[in-house]
């Protein structure tokens, strides 16, 4: 234990701590006024985020000290996958049996007292652990078998991913479904799988997205509020100012916040757009508030820390002699990268608004806890790669 603590990878640990600390400050700044308007204390979201980060640090430490062989355990992965499947299924049932449980048009949370659990975040980690294990075991066999035999080898991972993607689309959560699909595609490609198999995976996932889109569009046209809300958010990407009163207000006010901030910002706590103009500014649009208060240079620092973290994780994957550790690294890097791209793209208006949060910065317990666990896993992977003679996985 002492040896592990002495050899911790600071290229992962320091950016993680800094991002978590910045997130706490920005969540308080962005949420204090909104909390008061909701009849809560101004520090409500601050206290919750602080609690999430503390628990996250404990999870990070747990997964850092845990032997990686336990993560590869088939019973553990099976239990994890079944639990995630049951949670996603429960959300679909709630959506149809009790539509009032939807939050912002999506039935994506399981309510447990004052806290909400988002199974999608667990699904991302479960999928990474499963695919890293499966692809690292089957890689040699896939390369040596015929096309039909190889497809049989990868059909189960593809089927499981497709089920998760389709269930996530049903919430509806387009950004979450795209994140799961990206994990599948990148790990398939990184495993060295023949491109014709990767192309087959792309075709299947695209078919699921197209079918899900038309089902989703049909739901919106029949007047179901949750689907209509999500459709308006997607349409507002194309015409935010024309549709400002019908779903485009978030993007419009995001532009105002970025413009108000300029290079150096108005100062921490001095955002105008968080005062009732930008809905729930502490969630997926917290970067707009950061830009208004800290300026473009402040946002560059935040994104720079995320870049360092992702680059370090990818570097470790490239350095590893173990196919499993490499794929595990690429999978976790994919989670961080895709979330960051979707969030920044949504805030800037270059991608549709999907509700994807900014890693470590946005308010949210499920995201913080899962990402903290991912950081613990990566710290563990790092020490196994850098000092394999002392810490065998």
Image (spheres, rainbow, N blue to C red):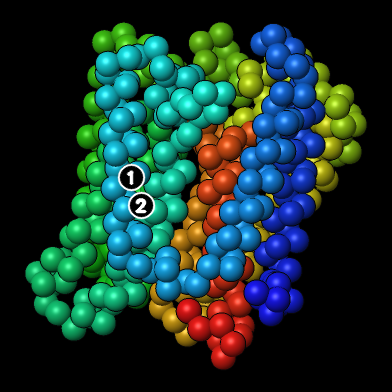
The picture places residue 281, in percent across and down from the top left corner, at 67, 25
Query: Does dot 2 land on a helix, a strand or a loop?
Result: helix
The picture places residue 216, in percent across and down from the top left corner, at 29, 25
Q: Mark 1 points at which residue?
A: 83
Quarter of the image with the N terminus is bottom right
The picture places residue 106, in percent across and down from the top left corner, at 42, 24
Q: Name the outermost residue toward the bottom.
A: 389
For this view, does 291 lie left or right of residue 377? right
Binning the other alpha carbons within 10 Å of mark 2 as few (below 14), some (14 to 19) or many (20 upward) gives: some
Q: Residue 271 carries which label?
A: none
Query: Does dot 1 land on a helix, a strand or a loop?
Result: helix
> Which quadrant would residue 14 be assigned to in this image?
bottom right
For this view, does 105 lie left or right of residue 43? left
Identify which residue, 125 or 313, lies in the foreground: 125
Identify which residue, 228 or 392, lies in the foreground: 392
Give the Cα distance between marks 1 and 2.
5 Å
Q: Is residue 357 visible?
A: yes
Q: Is residue 347 visible?
A: no
Look at 32% across and 21% down and name the residue there. Answer: 95
Q: Name the outermost residue toward the front.
A: 1
Binning the other alpha carbons within 10 Å of mark 1 as few (below 14), some (14 to 19) or many (20 upward) gives: some
Q: Mark 2 points at which residue?
A: 80
Residue contact between numbered discs 1 and 2, judged by CB atoms under 8 Å: yes
Give the answer, above or below, for where 90 lies relative to 104: below
Look at 59% across and 35% down and name the residue there. Answer: 364
Numbered marks: total: 2
Give the answer, above or below, for where 134 lies relative to 228: below
Give the answer, above or below, for where 289 lies relative to 175: above
For this view, does 320 lie left or right of residue 15? left
> Which quadrant would residue 49 be assigned to in this image?
top right
């Amino acid at each position: 234990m002492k040896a592990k603590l002495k050899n911790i990878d600071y290229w992962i640990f320091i950016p993680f701590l800094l991002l978590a600390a910045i997130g706490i400050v920005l969540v308080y700044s962005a949420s204090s006024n909104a909390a008061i308007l909701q009849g809560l204390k101004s520090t409500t979201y601050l206290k919750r985020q602080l609690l999430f980060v503390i628990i996250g640090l404990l999870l990070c430490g747990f997964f850092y000290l845990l032997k990686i062989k336990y993560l590869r355990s088939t019973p553990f992965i099976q239990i994890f996958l079944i639990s995630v499947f049951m949670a996603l299924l429960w959300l679909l049932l709630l959506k149809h049996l009790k539509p009032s449980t939807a939050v912002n048009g999506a039935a994506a949370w399981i309510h447990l007292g004052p806290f909400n659990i988002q199974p999608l975040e667990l699904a991302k980690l479960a999928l990474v652990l499963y695919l890293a294990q499966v692809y690292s075991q089957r890689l040699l066999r896939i390369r040596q078998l015929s096309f039909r035999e190889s497809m049989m080898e990868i059909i189960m991972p593809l089927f499981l991913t497709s089920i998760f993607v389709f269930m996530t689309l049903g919430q509806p959560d387009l950004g979450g479904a795209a994140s799961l699909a990206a994990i599948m595609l990148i790990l398939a490609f990184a495993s060295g799988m023949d491109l014709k198999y990767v192309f087959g995976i792309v075709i299947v996932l695209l078919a699921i997205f197209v079918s899900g889109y038309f089902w989703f569009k049909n739901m919106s046209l029949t007047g179901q509020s949750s689907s209509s809300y999500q459709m308006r958010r997607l349409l507002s990407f194309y015409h935010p100012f024309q549709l400002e009163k019908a779903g485009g207000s978030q993007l419009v006010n995001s532009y105002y916040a970025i413009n108000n901030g300029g290079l150096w910002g108005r100062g921490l706590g001095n955002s105008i757009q968080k005062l009732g103009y930008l809905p729930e500014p502490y969630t997926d649009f917290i970067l707009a508030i950061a830009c208004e208060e800290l300026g473009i240079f402040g946002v560059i620092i935040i994104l720079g820390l995320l870049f360092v973290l992702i680059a370090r994780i990818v570097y470790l994957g490239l350095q590893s002699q173990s196919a499993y550790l490499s794929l595990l690294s690429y999978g976790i890097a994919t989670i961080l990268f895709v979330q960051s791209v979707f969030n920044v793209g949504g805030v800037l208006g270059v991608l549709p608004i999907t509700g994807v949060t900014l890693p470590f910065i946005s308010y949210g317990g499920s995201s913080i806890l899962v990402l903290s666990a991912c950081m613990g896993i990566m710290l563990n992977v790092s020490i196994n790669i850098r000092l394999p003679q002392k810490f065998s996985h």
